[in-house]
Structure formats: C-alpha cells, structure tokens
Amino acid sequence: MTTDSAAISHSPQPATNPALRRFMHHKLAIFGIVCVAALILASVVGPYLLSYDHLYIDLRARFAPPMTGHHFLGTDPLGRDVAARLLMAGRVSLLVAFSAMFISIVIGVSIGIIAGYYGGRVGAVLMRVVDAFLCFPSILLLLTLAAFIRPSPMMITLLIAATSWMEIARIVSSEVRSLKERDFIAAARMAGLSNRWIMTRELLPNVMGPIIVAATLTVARAILSEAYISFLGYGIQPPYPSWGNMLNGAQQYLATAPWLAIVPGLVITLAVTSFNFIGDGLRDALDIRSQD
C-alpha cells in the first residue's frame, strides 16, 4: 500500500489550465510571442550593441546599401545607420503603442463596466457617447486631432488612446450586462457589498479574458495608427525616430534606395501580424465554448 501510494503521489500531473494548453497548441500565437519578444529585446538592447548611434551622421556614407561595412541595413540620406535608427524607432513606436493600449483599456473598461452594471439612463447616455465616437472613422478622427496639436510621443499616445477605447467599452458593457444577472452577483448584493466592490472584485475578474484579447489587438492597431499618421507627417517628428516617420522620410527614395522603406515596412508588418496572431490565440484559448 505504501509503495502504491508513493507511486501515485509521484506520478506526473496533467495540465490543470485548459486555456493555457489550448494557447500553447496555437502555433501562430507562439510564433507571434517569439517575434514580439525578439522585437522588444532588440529595441531595448540592440542600440547598445551597434557601432553607431542613431543620431551619428557620416556624410561620406550616404545611401550605403545594406551589408556595407558596419552598416548592416545600410544608411539613410544623411549617412545615419538604418539599423540603429530602426531599433531606436522600435523603442518609441512600441512604447507609444503599449502606453496607448493601457490608457484606452483604462478608459474603455471604466466606461463599459459602469454602463453595463448600472444600465438604465446612465448606461444609455454612456453608450450613446461611445456610439458618437464610433460614427467617425478612427483614422480620420486621429488625423483631425493631430492637425491641431504639437506632435510629440506623449501627445500621439494620448491621441491614439482617445480613438481606441470605444470597442473595448462596448465589449465590456456587453459582458457585464450578461454577468450581472448571475447568481454570484445576486449573492454579493444580498451580502451587502457595495457597487464598487461588486464591479471591481466580482465583475472585473470575470471579464478579463475579453479585455486581454482586446488589449493585444489594440497594440497592433496602435502601431498601425502611429505609423499611418507619422507617414503622413502629422505624427512623431524628428529627432525622435519612429517606424512611421522612417517610412515618411523614405518615400522620395523608393527608386534609388528602396531599403529605406522596405526595412521599417517589414518590421511594422511583422509587429502588427504578430500581435494579431497572439490576439487570435488568446481568443481561441479563452473561449469557453472551445473543446479540449
């Protein structure tokens, strides 16, 4: 009996989290995580490993093609190293994207949970505000706002966040309206718990799945939004580098120095695609209807 008990106690235990198991089987999501981790690591550490600073100008090396000397990705019209600028731009673009995601999540979740929980006139007013913002295409609204402010990384972050929270609010409001009729919410009310406690301690943890998925997809949209408005000249301005303003500076050299546009374009595509893959994997993993 003792031997059997020891054998049973030391037998390997199956995975206890089916959502994690489903996510780990999503190959594209794993690929996305690897790519995002590589981009973040390269942006944080990479500039310290290169021979040139992103602001170093060498007029003798103007338009050097990739793999020329220490310029692995070539140089730009001022002789600045493209690899150094790309990695430093990654810091700016990713920081803007993650910061905008965090702000939009805070705004969207706050409005969504209040509208969904209270309902009635309060919910109707808040959701009409959301609908009013959704009436305008987000890019058009973003460009309109950007035209009236002095562009800087902080202001671009706030603008992107201000045009990205509406979908999150709708998702959270819908989930909360469904959950507030459940028995555990009725039990919390009968126990005399405050509305704030119910919203933050009971409802919010139960809508974290859709929020996490929305957050991942919001990062992808924020990267595209920053690149779009910077490409049009309304976004982050030099000397701050970003993937978008690298594309803006490369458009007149497409025929003579195509690598100036190809390199940041490929990085933007890789980053956005990777975050979308992660979002798809999280959606499938957290879907309660998914079967093991």
Image: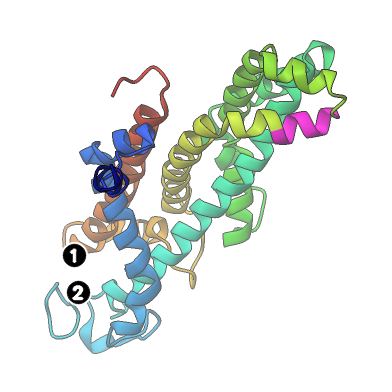
Q: Amino acid at mark 2?
A: Gly
Q: Amino acid at mark 1?
A: Ala
Q: Is 287 displayed left or right of 61 in the figure? A: right
* Image quarter of residue 182: top right
Q: In the image shown, does 289 or 161 lie closer to the viewer? A: 289
Q: Residue at x 42, y 50 (%)?
A: 227
* Image quarter of residue 53: bottom left
Query: Mark 2 and mark 1: span between their CA atoms?
Result: 9 Å
Q: Residue at x 76, y 26 (%)?
A: 114
- Residue 57 pos. (x, y %): 34, 85
Q: Which residue is mark 2?
A: 74
Does the magenta segment cover residue 195?
Answer: yes
- Residue 203 pos. (x, y %): 67, 28
Q: Is residue 42 above or below residue 80?
A: above
Q: Is residue 135 above or below residue 220?
A: above
Count every numbered label the image shows and give the total.
2
- Label placed on residue 257: 1
Q: Which residues are magenta?
A: 194-201
Image quarter hosting the N terminus = top left
Q: Nearer the viewer, mark 2 or mark 1?
A: 2
- Label placed on residue 70: none
Q: Residue at x 56, y 27 (%)?
A: 167
Q: Is residue 146 visible?
A: no
Q: Residue at x 65, y 26 (%)?
A: 133
Q: What is the crowding at mark 1: few (fewer than 14 residues within 10 Å), some, or many (at least 20)?
A: many
- Residue 113 pos. (x, y %): 70, 27
Mark 2 element type: loop
- Residue 204 pos. (x, y %): 65, 33
Q: Are marks 2 and 1 in contact (CB under 8 Å)?
A: yes
* Mark 2 / mark 1, whichever is N-terminal: 2
Colour mapping: rainbow
